[in-house]
Image (spheres, rainbow, N blue to C red):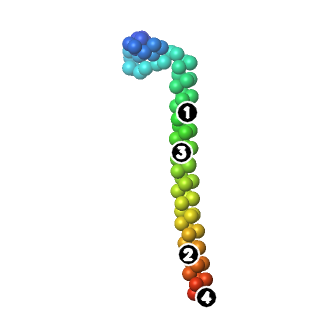
Amino acid sequence: MKKQPVKDNDGWFRDSQSGSFDNADTAKYQKYMAAYKAKQKEQEERVALQKDVSQLKSEMGDIKSLLLTLVQNQEKTL
């Protein structure tokens, strides 16, 4: 198994047998993984927020419907 440096990418090596790429710079890798995890967390938070907003819209629709029913029933009794 011989690892060859990747042109124009310091710290990266290509395994000549498997064709896989390896990163020898652990600091860059950790920085990349931290950014990746932060992006994933942000995306999860965005999805949760969209779900919450959608649920609130649905509940507001239910409240509006109940209020209209109350008003109609109140008008009938007058």
Give the residue pinned by disc 1: 37
Give the residue pinned by disc 2: 68
Give x and y (percent) for residue 32. Answer: 52, 25
Q: Earlier in the sequence, mark 3 or mark 1?
A: 1
Q: In this rendering, which labeled residue sits more in front, label 4 or label 3?
A: 4
The type of residue carrying mark 2 is Leu
- Residue 15, by quadrant, is top left
Q: Is residue 45 above or below residue 55?
A: above
Query: Of 49 and 9, which appears nearest the observer?
Result: 49
Q: Residue at x 45, y 13 (%)?
A: 10
- How far separated are the C-alphas under marks 2 and 1? 47 Å
Give x and y (percent) for residue 29. Answer: 53, 22
Query: Of 37 and 56, which appears nearest the observer?
Result: 56
Dot label at residue 2: none
Q: Residue at x 52, y 51 (%)?
A: 50
Q: Earlier in the sequence, mark 4 or mark 2?
A: 2
Q: Residue at x 54, y 29 (%)?
A: 35
Q: Earlier in the sequence, mark 2 or mark 1?
A: 1
For the N terminus, the quadrant is: top left
Query: Of 31 and 18, which appears nearest the observer?
Result: 31
The type of residue carrying mark 1 is Lys
Q: Check disc 3 and report its element: helix, strand or loop.
A: helix
